[in-house]
Amino acid sequence: MTAGTQLVALCTLVRKECTRVFRIWLQTILPPAMTTALYFLIFGNLIGRRIGQMDGYDYAQYIAPGLIMMQVITTSYGNVVSSFFAAKMQRHLEEMLVAPMASWAIVLGHALGGMVRGLAVAAAVTVVALFFTHLHVAHVLVTFSVVVLTAFVFSLGGLINAILAKNFDDVSIIPSFVLAPLSYLGGVFYSIALLPEFAQQLSRLNPILYMVNAFRYGMLGVSDIDIGLAYAIILAFAALLFGVCLLLIRRGTGIRS
């Protein structure tokens, strides 16, 4: 296939993924917004009043970027893993594999679909956050680039999970036992400066910490980590996971019996 034809195939796949997201928006976009509202109600308002300020901001305002990023991570990942795994189980993925569609187009198409859901959820959660606290964007380019790159990274992670998964249990293991703990320990609800030194160093091994803090820097202008290092880690993960996805698709790992 020519480059133009591959582009048409890519756009078609992205359109199909986006249609799926917005057709069932009550399942894909509304639940994260409702969950975030509960976080703000319990942590931001009730508990936040006792905590006071953190890094010069009201607690609800401080955790807002982290809550937005946490929903972006889980929904981007979940969108791709569910879509691709369903296609694999229902065996209509084979139609795409036998078509002269490049592996990079298959990977990028699913990743972009996950990104669209992640960004849509980010917008919805931001609207919810405005009902509970005041938000301003200190660095627009940083804010937008970090949320896009993070959605891309976890969309690719969801694709790898879906490729390797053999049953529905394999789909839920990573979100439950890996993503959830890393997200809660990634500085969403606190500054790592509050932790003992050994715990701070341990936290720096968590890649989600860099994504959350880079996004918080973009919105509020404060961060526990160096922004340049955060970008380097996010871009490294994006390149690594994209390469892994390409390799697995080309080899037919977990796809071709």
Image (tube, helix red, strand yellow):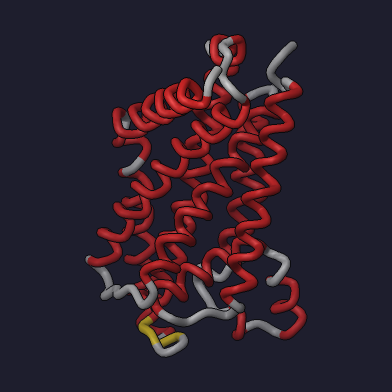
**Residue displayed at 65% across by 35% down:** 161
Can you say whether 88 is above or below 10 in the image? above
What count of labels does the image hold?
A: 0
**Residue displayed at 36% across by 69% down:** 140
The location of residue 44, given as percent across then percent down, is 36, 72
The location of residue 166, given as percent across then percent down, is 69, 23
Residue 43 shows in the view:
no
Taking the view exactly as shown, the residue that stands out farthest to the bottom is: 56
Q: Quadrant of residue 84?
A: top right
Q: Quadrant of residue 116?
A: top left
Residue 192 shows in the view:
yes
Closer to us: 251 or 78: 251
**Residue displayed at 44% across by 36% down:** 113
Quadrant containing the C terminus is top right
Quadrant containing the N terminus is top right
Q: Quadrant of residue 99?
A: top right
Can you say whether 71 is above or below 112 in the image? below
The location of residue 197, given as percent across then percent down, is 73, 85
**Residue displayed at 39% across by 74% down:** 139
Can you say whether 231 is above or below 155 in the image? below
